[in-house]
Amino acid sequence: MQQAINLIKSSDNILILTHKNPDGDAVGSVLGLAHALSCLDNKNVECFSKSEIPEVFKFLPGVSKIKNQIDPKHYDLVVLLDCAFFSRTGVDDIREIASSHNNLLIIDHHPKNKTEQDCILIIDDKASSAAILIYNLLKEMRIKITKNISDCLLTGIFTDTGGFQHSNTDPQSLETAAELMRKGSRIDKIAKNIFNGKNVPAIKLWGKALSRIQTDKNTKMAISYISKNDIEECGAKEEDASGLISIINTVSDAKFSLLLTESENKKIKGSLRSEDYKGIDVSEIARSLGGGGHKLASGFEMEGEDVENSVRRIREMILKNTTTLSS
Ligand SMILES: [Mn+2]
């Protein structure tokens, strides 16, 4: 931690970036850290996300600071948040950044055995969110937590714990949330923006996916899908499917749930969820399909154009590849 603090203090030009398809923790952590470092003297802080920031997070203060292009200049420090590999940021030619910075700091809470080389790490896979790690870092640096910082970090904790409902909700998450509420942040406002700000096209899209949920005896999963056609017909956006997997995951007699989404450029995106008491590690399934993530929330991406065919194909692959299903 001290090494990271020294590095931050001695860097003037700092670039903060996160994984593509950023979630609330990614966006909240980037902005929380950016607000905090911008308060320090003589720091130029820039933020990057390859993907557009989902509409539901646009209430966060300073969201327009996140650019989707990197200014190709020299950075003293690049901070990678909520992931441990440049490849996760979706930047095509990573050498453009990698060669232009002196130091790399990774702050992440995903379980892993590898990270980028030659970097300073703040990694804790017991932490419910990257936002908690940022909070601890700022406390250690004695940076005053402003309302802007706390809104961003609380959003990160709130979303990564599924609104304090997932099994990663621990005393540290609640204590940190309480601290952030004392700075003036309000969970009800965050919840309203994230869960209750749905537009009609998004709800219609959820309806389509929910109406075709199937449970599968062999794989023990609840599965549904969204095609590009659905998104078009509903007048929705791909990001409107975010959060839907949690509803599919409420099917009681399934061990885990899977939502497949046909996305741009001939890719099928898969989101996997389970619950602690169901005794399954979905990250194992995700890894067998070329993805990764947490034990109870993982994802993968694969080539494919036809989502209905992919449902069949992926079901077979899951049956073949996964040993935990027999447990
Ligand atoms: Mn996270």
Image (cartoon, helix red, strand yellow):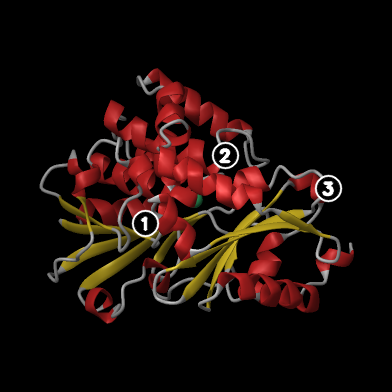
| Residue under the point 82% across and 71% down | 323
| Residue under the point 43% across and 73% down | 116
Mark with earlier residue (2, 3): 2
Where in the figure is residue 309, as x and y percent of width and height?
A: 63, 75
What separation in Å lies between label 1 and label 3 (alpha carbons)? Answer: 48 Å
Q: Helix, strand, or loop for circle 1?
A: helix
Does the rendering let one see residue 132?
no
Q: Which mark is residue 3?
A: 1
Drawn side of residue 238 relative to residue 302, left or right? left
Q: Please state which amino acid type lies under the numbered disc 3.
A: Asp
Q: Quadrant of residue 11?
A: bottom left
What residue sits right under mark 3 in the picture?
A: 253
What residue sits right under mark 2 in the picture?
A: 162
| Residue under the point 73% across and 46% down | 275
Q: Please state which amino acid type lies under the numbered disc 1.
A: Gln
Mark with earlier residue (1, 3): 1
Foreground residue among 202 and 167: 202
Drawn side of residue 177 relative to residue 12, left or right? right
